Image (spheres, rainbow, N blue to C red):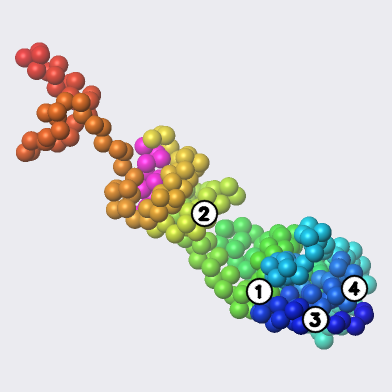
Amino acid sequence: MQAVTLTGEELKRLLSCGCSDAVSLYLYRRSGAPLELAMDALSFTAQRMRQSADTLRTLGMWDSEERTELPRPERPGYTESDVRNAITGRNGEFSKLVGEAQRRLGRTLSTEELKILLSFVDYLRMPVEVAALLISFCVERSRQKGSRSPSMRAVEKEAYHWADENIDTLEAAIAYMQNRMQIQSRMKHLQDLMQLRDRRLTKAEEQYLDSWITMGFTDDVIMHAYEKTCLNTGGLKWAYMHSILKSWNEKNLRTLRDIAEGDGAPKRKSSNRNDQYQRHGETTVTELEREAIRRALEEG
């Protein structure tokens, strides 16, 4: 790397941004080092890389031709030797992670599974303690769904999600796990309320429930939408129910009272001036009811 000299204006902008990652990325770029190796050299996750670049763009310190997707180093093709070296090295941390993973998953990991596990700490830059929490989270999520221990491929998919969400500290991991477990428990409760106890939910059904909980609806509001769906369609139609709740969310109708006041059908304007007044004791009747009453009077 070559020496970096900053102008007064550059220094002023960098000091004002309040993002040390952006400063590191800018200095790295100015040093002439290859951009495609930045994540590896700076030990950045993909999320930190994007956030740093976005900050530099805001400051006007990122070239327009680099607005495309940032390069990411290729995932290494780990060998058995890599796995052995990781187990015997790294101050014993990876070895402890292997032991914890096997204990939580209830089986001895194969060589291919160990390669996946190694990618968490080597490729995704995930701290060992966070990787251990990730595995515990996946196991507990499977248990709540009544399914067997998750595969390492399923854990790997969740690991990439954590990396994209920048969940790379114990605090962030614990907060995320608590939130997801609360949602999972609530989904199970709603499944019981909707009389779906005897089967597992499909992925799409889980996504619907997740979205309604995320919208902030209480049980009574969700069940009100459920009843409307069953009455109008003859059963549970997930897309129809979702359209109801989505409409209420867009109108910011959060309670049953809000819905009763803000989601009612507009009243029909009567062409008969006498109909504009409601006599004492009267109730509003529909056009079909009016016709039935008229026929009854005509028949004596």
Inspect the magenta stretch and tell me whether residue 226 lies in it.
yes
Q: Which of marks 2 and 3 is in front?
A: 3
Look at mark 1 in the image and give the residue it sits on: 133
The answer to which of 42 and 274 lies nearer the viewer is 274
The residue positioned 79% from the left and 74% from the top of the image is 25
The secondary element bearing badge 3 is classed as loop
Instruction: Say what amino acid the circle numbered 3 marks.
Output: Thr
CA separation in Å, label 1 and label 2? 25 Å
The answer to which of 237 and 287 lies nearer the viewer is 287
Magenta extent: 220-231
Magenta span dominant secondary structure: helix
Instruction: Say what amino acid the circle numbered 4 marks.
Output: Ala
Snapshot quadrant of residue 146: bottom right
**N-term mark: 2 or 4:** 4
CA separation in Å, label 2 and label 4? 43 Å
Look at mark 4 in the image and give the residue it sits on: 33
Look at mark 2 in the image and give the residue it sits on: 211
**N-term mark: 1 or 4:** 4
Look at mark 3 in the image and give the residue it sits on: 7
Instruction: Say what amino acid the circle numbered 1 marks.
Output: Leu
Instruction: Say what amino acid the circle numbered 2 marks.
Output: Ser
